[in-house]
Amino acid sequence: MDVSIFDLTKTFGKVRANEQIRLHFAAGQIHGVLGENGAGKSTLMKLLAGFLRPDAGEIWLDGQPVKLLNPAIALRVGIGMVAQEPLVIPAFTALENFYCASPASAMPNLASARQRLLNYAEQFGFTIQPDLPVANLTVGQRQQLEILRLLALGAKLLILDEPTTGISALQKKALFEALRKLAAEGKTILFVSHKLEEVAEICTTVSILRAGRVAGEGQMIMPQPQDHLLSLMFGQEIQTKNPSLPQKSETSSAQSVWKLDSVTLREGSRSLPNLNLDIPAGTILGLAGLEGEGQQLFLRLLAGRLRPKTGQFWLKDVEMTNSAPKAFREAGIHYVPADRLAEGLVGKFSLVEHLSLLSKMPGLLINLRSAQAQAGAAIATYAIKAAPTTPLAALSGGNQQRAMLALIPAHCTGLLFDQPTRGLDILSARAVWQQLLARKAAGTAIVFASVDLDELLKYSDSILVFHGGRVSKALDRTDLSATQLAELIGGVGFVAGE
Amino acid sequence: MNLDQFWVDLAAVLASASPLILATLGETITERAGVINLSLDGTMLLAAMVGFAVGFQSQNVGLGLLAAALVGGFIGLILGFLSLSLRQSQTAVGFVLALLCTDLSSFLGNAYVRVPGVAVPSMPIPFLKDLPILGKLFFHHDLIVYSSFILTPALSWFLFQTRNGLILRALGEQPTAAFARGINVIQYRYFYTILGGMLVGLAGAAYSLDLKQGWSHRHIAGMGWIALAIVIFGAWQPWRVAFGCYLFSALQVLASRSQSLWPSVPTQVFQVAPFALMLGFLVLVNLSNKPPSTPREAQISLRWLSLAKLMLLMQGLLHSLAASPPAALGKPFYNDEP
C-alpha cells in the first residue's frame, strides 16, 4: 500500500508533537523513521494507526484520501500497528488475544482462529503456543503474536514502533527475516527506531524527525553516512567515534567487592546453580543473555535482596550470606532496576523531595534549603534537564536515569544496573556511561545486565553469559567478538562455569 | 428436623438467593468491563421502591419489574456519564450515588410504606414439579427464581464461549489493547454499565415484589454491600459468584432456624451472623492469595501426617479460590494522550 502524508499536524496543549509532516512511503519497501526520544515518531505512527486524530493535514492511501477516525477504521483499510509495548491482554491466552475482536469474516470461530494462528506462525518461523497465557510470553513473542494478528486481519501497512527493544538477538533475526519477506510480498513496512545500525541494516529509505518536524531534505534512500543521520537527529555535529576498548586494568591486585563460593539461587521455578565468582573493585562485569535467564536473580543476590539457597557469599571479605538488604546498602551497594518509575523512583516526587527522603537529618521537619542546594548541585553535575522541583515522571528516560545516578552517593562500593540504557537515545546513553566509567575509575565495582550486545562489549571488562538456567564462567572481554557473544547467548558453544 | 423440612429449607435457600444472584451477576458484568458500580445498595433500594410503587399504581407486576430495571439502568447511565465521559472517580461517584439513592428511596417511597401491593405470582412448572425432590427444589418457584437459575450458566457461557464475551473481558483487562483492536471502549463500557445496572434494579424489585414483598424505609439496606463483597469473593466468575450467593442465603436460613432453637439468644445475633460469617470467608480467601507452601514432610512426624495433609488440602482449596480482579478495574481510559 502506497502511503502519502500531507502537512500532518498534531498538538497536545502547547506541545507541537507533529508539525506539517509531509512524507511518502512506497509499497513493497521497509521505511525507517528515525528520531531521538520525544521527536514525534510515536505520535505520527498513532495518527497513521487511527489512535489519534490529526489537528490538520491529510493521509492518502493508494491515491485516495482517508479519514482515520479510530483504530477500527484504520484496521479496515489495512493499517496495523505493533506498539513498542505490544498491546496484548496479559490475562488471555495467545489464541484468545489473536481471536479477540477479530471480524467474523476473518475468523468465524475459535477453531478456525487456532488454525490461522498456527499457519501464520509456521509461515514466519515464529514459535507461539496458542494456549499459553500471554503473561508468560516474552516481549519478543508478544510482538510476534501481534504481527501475526495484524496480518490475519489483512494489514497492508505494518507499523512497528521500536520493535527491537527488549527482544533477543534470535528474535530480532527472525523479525528482520519476516519483515523482508512481507516487503517482498508488496506490503509497506514502517520501522520506527532510534537505533541507527538497525535502520541501516534493514531499511530501504529513512526519514528523520526532530522536534516534531521532518529534518533535512525529507525521505532519503539508504545507505546514508552515519554522521549525516546523527547530525540530522540531534541537530548538531556529535562525536560518533566509539570510545576505545576498556583498558585491561591491573585488576589482579584490587580488593574483591563480591565473592561467591558455590552459591545456588532459587526463586519459584527458576534457579541458578553453583556460582563461583570474584568481582574486584574498579571493574565492570556485564551480564549477557536473553531476557529472564536469571540475570535479575543474580543482580538481586548481589544487592542482598535474594538470599542464596546454598553456598557462601562475601562482601569486601565480610560474610554476608544471610544479611538483610539494609546491611548491603550500608556497605555501599546500590541497585538500579530496569523499570525506574516502578521500582526506583517516586514519579510524582521531584529531585528535592527524593533527596529529602534520603537525607538522614534528625527531627521532624524537612531541611528544604539543604535539599534544594543538593538538588541544584546534582542537576549541574549530572546535566539533568529539570528544575529542582520538577516531578521526575515528567522527565525523559535519559534524565530520569541521570537523576537516579545523582541519588546514589558518589563514593560507593558496588553498583548494580538492570538495563542501564533501555529506552534512552544515544546521547543520553553515552552520558550515563560517562558517569559510570568515572565511578569505575574511582574504584566502584559495576555489574550490569543488558540485552544490547554493543553495550556489553563496549563497557565490560568481563562478561557472564546466562543461558538455559546456567551461567558461564567470567569471560574476558578482550577474548570475545560480537559474533561469538551472540552465539553464546543463543547457546552455541556455551559451557557452564565450574 | 425431618427430611421433608430439609428439602423445604433448601428450596427456600435457592429462592431467597435469587435477588442476590441478579444483583451480583449484574455487577459482575459491569466490573468485567472495568467499571466499579459502588451504588448497588442505593440502586437496589430505589429500584425496589419504584418497582413496588409502579406495580401498586398500575396493579401490574410486569410494569413494576420493568420500572425497577429502568431505574437501575438509569443509575448506571449516571455513573457512566460522570465517570466515563466526565472522567470523575468511579469510587467517589458510586459512593455518592449509593447514599443519594438510599435517601431518595425513603423520601419518595413514604406513601407506599406498608401498603399491600402486587406480587410476582408463583408458577410451578407442569410435570417437572411432580418429580420427586427435584420438583420441590427447582420447579416450585416463580419467574424471578427461574431466571436466576438460568442467568448463571448463561453469563458463564457468554463470558467464556462467545466472541462478545471475549471483548467484554478484554475491556476490563486491558482497554488500550481493546481500543487497538478497533473496539469503542467508552461506548461498550456504557452499555455494560447500564446492562449491569438494569439487573441490579431488577434485583431490588425481586425483593419488593417477590421475596420481601412490600415497601418500608431501608427495606433491604445492606444487601447491596453484601452483593459487592460476594462479587469479589466469587472472583468475577459467574459460578463462584452464584455459589457465594447461595452460601449467604443458606447462612440466613440457618440463622432464622437457629433463632427458634435458642430463644435466649437475642435475635440481632442471628440477623448479623450471616454478614460476619461472610466476612470470615472473605478473609480466608484473601489469605490464600499467598502461594501454598511446599510440604516439608521430613519435619512432620507420622502422628501429624494426616492432619498436615488435611491442612495442605485446605490450603490448596483456598488457593484455588483466590483470584485477581480484572486488571483495569476502576481505572479510567483515555485514548487522546500522546
Image: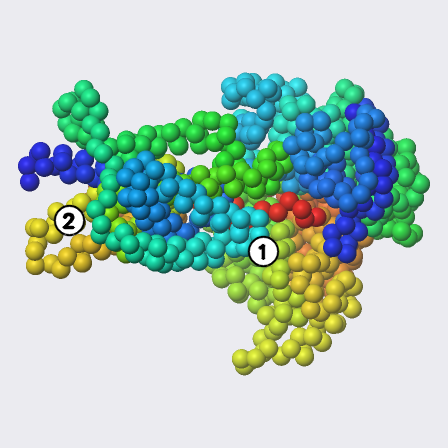
Crowd class of label 2 (few under 14; some 14 to 19; many from 20; radius 10 Å)? some
In-image side of B191 versus B304 (left or right): right
Residue A33 percent coordinates (x, y): 81, 39
Locate the N terminus of chain A by quadrant.
top right
Q: Can I make out residue A467 in this image?
A: no
**What is the basis of the colouring in this image?**
rainbow
Locate the C terminus of chain A by quadrant.
top right
In-image side of B80 versus A151 (left or right): left
The chain that hosts pointer 1 is: A
Q: Which residue is mark 2?
A: B256
SS under mark 1? helix
Residue B211 percent coordinates (x, y): 23, 42
Asked if residue B105 is positioned above or below residue B297 in the image, the reply reads below
Query: What amino acid type should be assigned to the residue bearing mark 2?
Result: Ser
The chain that hosts pointer 2 is: B
Residue at 62% x, 79% y: name it.
A367
> Which mark is nearer the camera, 2 or 1?
2
Q: Are marks 2 and 1 on the same chain?
A: no
Q: Which residue is mark 1?
A: A343
Kindly indicate whether the residue at mark 1 contacts the one at mark 2 (C-beta within 8 angstroms). no
